[in-house]
Structure formats: C-alpha cells, structure tokens
Amino acid sequence: MINGKRVMVVMPAYKAALTIERTLSEVSPGVVDDYLLVDDASPDNTADVAKSLGLSVVVHPKNRGYGGNQKTCYNEALRRGADVIVMLHPDYQYSPKLVGAMAHLVASEEFDAVLGSRILGTTGALAGGMPYWKYLANRFLTATENALLGVKLSEYHTGYRAFSRKVLETLPLEENNDDFVFDNEMLAQTVWFGFRIGEISCPTKYFPEASSINFKRSVKYGFGVLGTAFLFRFNKMGITKSRLFANDGRRLNGK
C-alpha cells in the first residue's frame, strides 16, 4: 500500500508470453498489492506464463480489442478494491521501474491521473526506436489535441497510465470504443470531468516482441483521435451532446 491506498497493476495482454517475466522483474518490490493480467484471446501461452508467475489472470474467450481489454482490466480493478490502478503493458515497451513513482503521485493525491510520457526528457521516443513517421504523427496529433481540449500535455498516446479509483468510477468508459482509440477517448473524458493529469518522463523501447500497430491501423487511430478532439470541442461549444462526455453515460460496473 501507498499512503494507505491499495495499488493494483493491470496488464492488458495479447501475445506477451515472451516478455511478461522480464516486465515483472523490474517492478520495485513492496509497491504493488495486486497484479491482474487480462489475456485477450492470445494464440500463444500468455495466460499460462502469467499464471506460472503467480498473477491473477482473466482470459477473454474471444478477442475484444485493446479498448475492450482495458474495460475488463478496470472493471476487475474496481471489483477487487483497488484505490490506485496502474496500467502496465506486459510487452516490456515501457519501463516497469516507474510503477512506484506513478502510483505515488496518484496515492498522494497530487494528481488524479499520471501518464508515462515518451516525449519528455532526454531519453525520448526516437532514442528508444520509435519510427520517425510515428513520432511526427504523435507531435501533430498532440498539438491539435492540446488546442482543442485546452490543456498542455506532452503526449496523449502513451499506453502507460495510472488512475485513482475515483477517475475510473466517474468516467463513462463503457461508451468508449473497443479499439486503440479508447486510450484517447479516456484522456479526453479525464479532461472533460475536471481531473488533474500529471506526466513523468518514461524511457521506451521498440523491438520485435513489443506490440505496435501497423501503418494502416495507425491511420485509422489518427482519424479517431482527431474525431475525439473535435467532438470534445463541439460539446464544449454546445453544438453536440456526445455520450462520451455525458454525466449519465454508461460506467463500469466494478461489481
């Protein structure tokens, strides 16, 4: 526990059998109370490896997508009584050594959500092997989102995040897409509902076993990101009323 708050790491997994153990080995001891891995119908032995390492595991009988996987992760975290929830990808792309720092920032109530940014600091995304076209797309989309959402984040596209229980209970996450744009919709909702977002610099690694979407899916994601940002702005202006930002939107059950 940190500051009397129960910390859970949730791991949305797909074909991560080769990297789970290495990822876990770098999390500082004594920081995390519970781990949960959600296997999104992987064709390899991801679930078996996770169980052999002592993790709690939930297996989707059919692939639900990255966003659908996160919905299960967060529902289970709430159901199991977590106060601080850190999403750590089990593919070893993001540094597991930062779990404690991110959890502390949320548990101390300095922030409601904390992002591990690949852009901040001198060990940036390009140094970690991010393809240049992805880096340029990241910078363009982030600048557009900052302008439309009225905040200033270094990036919106990191998959390394920590949230307080209150955030997960408040956001209408069931309204979100089940694909990769879920991440972006969730951040837009976090801003919409007035939560405080912090960032820390996070070294990242790109290598064959690390998950990464291809160019075609990246283009689809990019248009989804822009659509979410404009939808946020139109809602602020009263032009539209999206369920993504509705107080009575569908929330996680957590039961």
Image: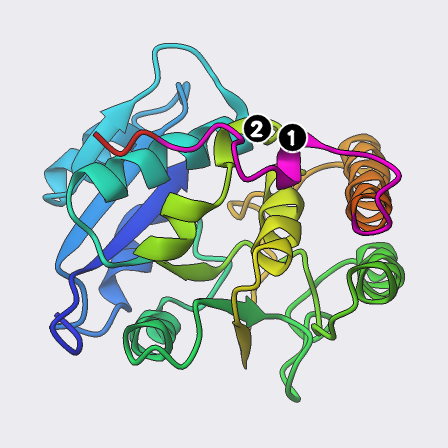
Out of 190 and 25, give the one closest to the viewer.
190
Say whether residue 215 is visible. yes
Quadrant location, the C terminus: top left
Residue in the picture at 58% in, 54% down:
207
42 in the magenta segment = no
Q: Check disc 1 and report its element: helix, strand or loop.
A: helix
Out of 173 and 11, give the one closest to the viewer.
173
The part of the chain drawn in magenta is 236-252
Residue in the picture at 83% in, 31% down:
216
Asked if the residues shown at circle 2 and circle 1 are in contact, with their CB atoms under 8 angstroms apart, the answer is yes
Quadrant location, the N terminus: bottom left
Residue pointed to by mark 2: 175
User: x, y (%) of residue 179?
Assistant: 62, 29
User: x, y (%) of residue 201?
Assistant: 56, 80
Out of 215 and 157, give the one closest to the viewer.
157
**Relative horizontal placement of residue 40, taking residue 184 as reference (left or right):** left
Question: Secondary structure of the magenta portion, mostly?
Answer: loop
